[in-house]
């Protein structure tokens, strides 16, 4: 009998395939939103519709504008995050109680992004969308699950933890 992939890794594999469409030169992210075992929406990171992507330009705008900044600097980045793109493509009714699956990897070696999790802006959007759980791939078999209610109850801003 052939081994059957578990449902969580099935959706994470789909999110990884979605990430392959990303246009960032450094990191590729893919998101799949699932509700009642049905895919509601997908999204990958890239420039807003109609604008040139870094892959089209041939350089990372964030790296060009902020060469010494490793974390943060989201305003210099052309990309809309994969979570944001998936959320704006679905109705709130479809997302109420849903699970968001997220995969991120580095372009130079396809290593999964260590400690990947939605940024604070994406967390706010996830909370308002009605999504209940976020599952992020750590490696090909392992993942971490976040309960969105915990983000509501443990507000980073009130605790002074405004890290990106």
Image (cartoon, helix red, strand yellow):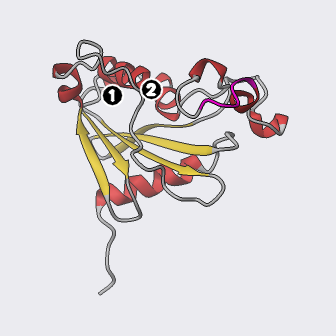
Q: Residue 49 appears at what percent x and percent y?
A: 70, 24
Q: Secondary structure at mark 2?
A: helix
Q: Quadrant of the N terminus?
A: bottom left
Q: Residues within 10 Å of mark 1 (few under 14, many from 20)?
A: many
Q: Residue 51 appears at what percent x and percent y?
A: 76, 23
Quick check: 117 left or right of 147? right
Query: As displayed, is residue 58 above or below residue 65?
Result: below
- Taking the spot 82% from the left edge, 37% from the top edge, the residue there is 56
* Residue 98 image-quadrant placement: top left
> Mark on residue 87?
2
Q: Please say whether residue 56 is one of the residues in the magenta stretch.
A: no
Q: Residue 50 appears at what percent x and percent y?
A: 76, 23
- Taking the spot 55% from the left edge, 54% from the top edge, the residue there is 17
* Residue 81 image-quadrant placement: top right
Query: As displayed, is residue 145 above or below residue 164?
Result: below
- Taking the spot 53% from the left edge, 51% from the top edge, the residue there is 105
> Mark on residue 95?
1
In this view, the residue farthest toward the bottom is 1
Closer to us: 18 or 77: 77
Closer to us: 88 or 153: 153
Q: Which badge, 2 or 1, comes first in the chain's sequence?
A: 2
Q: Which residues are magenta?
A: 65-69
In this view, the residue farthest toward the front is 68
The answer to whether the residues at label 2 and label 1 have Cβ atoms under 8 Å apart is yes
| Magenta: main secondary structure | loop
> Mark on residue 38?
none
Q: Secondary structure at mark 1?
A: helix
Closer to us: 74 or 94: 74
Quick check: 124 left or right of 59? left
């Amino acid at each position: 009998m052939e081994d059957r992939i578990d449902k969580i890794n099935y959706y994470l594999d789909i999110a990884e395939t979605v990430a392959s469409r990303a246009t960032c030169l450094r990191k590729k992210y893919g998101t799949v939103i699932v509700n009642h075992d049905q895919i509601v929406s997908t999204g990958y990171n890239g420039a807003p519709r109609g604008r040139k992507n870094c892959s089209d330009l041939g350089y990372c705008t964030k790296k060009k504008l902020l060469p010494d900044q490793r974390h943060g600097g989201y305003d210099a980045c052309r990309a809309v995050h994969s979570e944001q793109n998936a959320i704006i493509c679905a109705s709130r009714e479809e997302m109420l109680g849903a699970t968001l699956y997220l995969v991120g990897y580095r372009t130079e070696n396809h290593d999964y992004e260590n400690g990947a999790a939605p940024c604070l802006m994406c967390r706010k959007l996830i909370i308002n969308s009605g999504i209940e759980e976020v599952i992020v791939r750590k490696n090909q078999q392992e993942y971490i699950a976040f309960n969105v209610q915990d983000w509501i109850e443990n507000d980073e801003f009130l605790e002074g933890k405004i890290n990106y």
